[in-house]
Amino acid sequence: MDIGNILHEVLERFAKKVVESGESFALLSEEKRTAIQAESLAETFDYGDDIFKSSSRNSYQLERLRRIADRAVRTVLTQIKKGSFTPVAFEEEFVTGGFKGRIDRIDTVLSDYLPDGSLLAKNKEFSGFKKCEYVRVIDYKSGSKSLDLDRAYYGLDLQLFTYLNYIRKEFGKKRKDNLIIPSGAYYFHIDDPVVDFGGGEDAILKELRFDGITLSGNHNIRLIDEAMVYNNTLTPQTDSDVIKLKTKKDGEPSSTTRLYVSGEMNELIDNSELEIDKSKKRILKGEIYPKPYSLGSEKGCDYCEYRGLCGFDLKMPGYNYNRLKKIDKKCFFEELRAKLEGENGKKMD
C-alpha cells in the first residue's frame, strides 16, 4: 500500500471533479468542497477498503489518511484563494529532450502586466503578444523532498527544471497570442505537520507552503500572494502563506528567499537540458561503471535500492566516489554561467 500514491490520487480526483462541476477553485463553497472531497476520498479508498478494515492498525491508518487528505485539499484551496492562479491541467504528460514525464499540476493566470509591473502593451520587445500568461508547475510529494541548487547544478535534481523546460518550449505552442512566463516551480508536501502548541491553522499553512523557485518581480509575487504586494511594492515584515517568502523592515526579501530573475531561471533550465543530454550520451555509450556521488554529507548510495548488486566497495582498488563540491551561494550563478559557456556546456544566446 503506497500512501503517497493514495494521497496523490485524492488530490487529482478532487481537482478534476471541481473542473467537471464548472465550479471555481477560488470561489468554491465549504459545502461544495466537503461534498466533492468526500466523493474523491470514497472513490480512492474503495479499492483498498478490505485492507483498511483488516486490522485496528490499518483502520487507524485510514483515518490518518483521511485527515491528511482533508488538510491537503483545504491547503490547496487556501493557496489558490490567496492569489490569482487557477489550476488548468492535471497529470499533464509531456516529452522533452527525449524523456517522457508527467506534471502533477499546472496553474496559470492571464495578465496585462509583465513581472516588474510594466504594461505588456507598451513593451516593444513583446509587441506581438496580447496577454502575459503566467505559468507555475507543482509536484506533489508525500516525503520531505526540498529543492537543492547544488544538486540541480550537478544533474542530481532536475525534475522541476525539466517541467519548466516543457513550459518554456511546448506549453505556449497552443497559446500563440500569449507571452508565456514561467512563474515558478514547486514541491507541495502532502503532510500532517506538527506545529507548536497554539500555532493553529496559520502555523500549519506556513508549514505546507510551496517549496521551490519563484520568478522575481513584484507583479508576479502579487499574482501568487496578494498580501505580499501593495502598489507594486513588497509589503514590509510580511511572511507569505503560499511560498517561502518573507520580507524585512525595508520591504526587501529575506536572504533565505528563492527569487530569481528571468535570466537566472533560464540558466537553471538550460543546465537541466545540458545534464540530461550528458546522461543520454553516457547511457548510449553503455557507461555502467559504478561511481556514486558524494556531496557534503550526502552520498548516492544512502537510499539506493541496488547497493547490494552494483559491487561498489571502497575497499576494492579502483572504486571511489565522484566527489562534488558545495557551491558558494554568492557565486552560484557565476559558476553556472561558466559551466554553460564552457568546454562541456553549450553557448548561451
Image (cartoon, grey):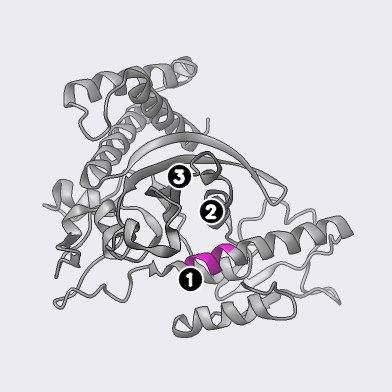
Percent x, y for residue 258? 37, 67
Place residue 17 in its image quadrant. top left
Residue tagged 2: 168
Rendered residue at 42%/33% (across/down): 7
Residue placed furthest toward the left: 198
How crowded pointer 1 is (Cα within 10 Å; few <14, some 14-19, many 20+) is rated as: some
The residue type indicated by label 1 comes to: Glu
The region drawn magenta spans 265-269
Rendered residue at 43%/55% (across/down): 181
Label 2 – label 1 distance at C-alpha: 14 Å
* Mark seen at residue 264: 1
Residue placed furthest toward the right: 285
Magenta stretch contains residue 8: no
Label 1 – label 3 distance at C-alpha: 25 Å
The residue type indicated by label 2 comes to: Arg
Percent x, y for residue 314? 77, 73
Q: What element does badge 3 sit on?
A: loop
